[in-house]
Image: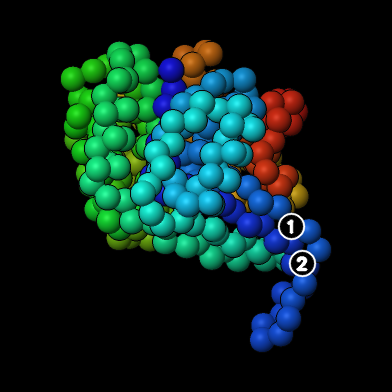
Amino acid sequence: MIYTVTLNPSLDYVLQVDNLVKNCVNRSSAEQLIAGGKGLNVSIMLKNLGIQTVTLGFIAGFTGEKIREEVKKIGCIDEFIMLPKGLSRINIKLKGSEETEINAQGPYIPEQSLNILFKKLAKLKDNDILILAGNAPSSLGNDIYAKIMSTLSDRNILTVVDASGEQLIKTLKYKPFLIKPNIHELSEVFNVPIETKEDIILYAKKLCELGAKNVIVSMDKRGAVMVCSESEYYCKAKCISAVNSTGAGDSMVAGFLAKYLESRDKKKALSFAVATGTAATSCMGFPTKEDIIALCE
């Protein structure tokens, strides 16, 4: 079974604002309310690809209940933990000629709720897949993913980490199967400017030396580079009209896993991952399997 962990899920309030003007009243031309958060986005995209997942994490208040409702509507298996107080966050996504996002902080997560999560994770078995995605609330520190991986280190679990900074670096000693920084996050990890494919390969190799088995670095419109112990791969993205960047990286993770589990071929999986991420930028929400296959042709 595939498990996704979204420690700080959200309701994303997406507003289409064709001409945003500062210091005056703006009116939207369309609105959409979507359950979001990186791990949950991976679950939604995998569901579109015909793969079931269990969604784990924390929700709170009436906004949390709405997230749970949306998860069930999508058809994912809901294992979210309701917090004793607070509200799950609402993020504002303004879409127009440019994209502007305002992401809220989210609720405080008490120790007793965190313990419930660890009890749920303790049920994972050999050959399960665990996806740890997104930034953790500040109350959990910058090593919560490493702590999770530490408790499961005695099992043969395929782990995917999509995080940034110290949260990512501290997981590497547990040898995650896949990490997926974007080019900006890779630059931040090593505190150097990274622009070319050669730069990406150089620093992705350093992440492999630190423990990651496979590293995919997304390059926005340019596609993605993958580095692993046996080889390096590059896949160019098709040129399309992009309308939405939210969830594109999460869709890449889902696309890679779906194709890798089917074929065990990393090159094919990278190509499908890039097509999935590209398709996600072409629509408000998540693309269908047919949308993705069309980009692979």
Apparent side of residue 142 relative to residue 250 in the rendered image (left or right) = left
How dense is the environment of label 1, judged by Cα within 10 Å: few (below 14), some, or many (20 and up)?
some
Task: Determine whether 73 is above or below 29 in the image.
Answer: above
What color scheme is it? rainbow
Task: Determine whether 251 is above or below 23 in the image.
Answer: above
Q: From the viewer's side, name the closer residue of 145 and 175.
A: 145
- Residue 28 is labelled as 2
Q: Which residue is mark 1?
A: 31
For the residues bearing labels 2 and 1, Cβ distance under 8 angstroms: yes
Q: Quadrant of the N terminus?
A: top left
Residue type at numbered disc 2:
Ser
Residue sitting at x 77%, y 66%: 28
Residue type at numbered disc 1:
Glu
Task: Determine whether 42 is above or below 64 in the image.
Answer: above
* Residue 267 shows up from this direction: no
- Residue 260, given in percent of the width and then of the height, sits at 49, 19
Q: Secondary structure at mark 1?
A: strand
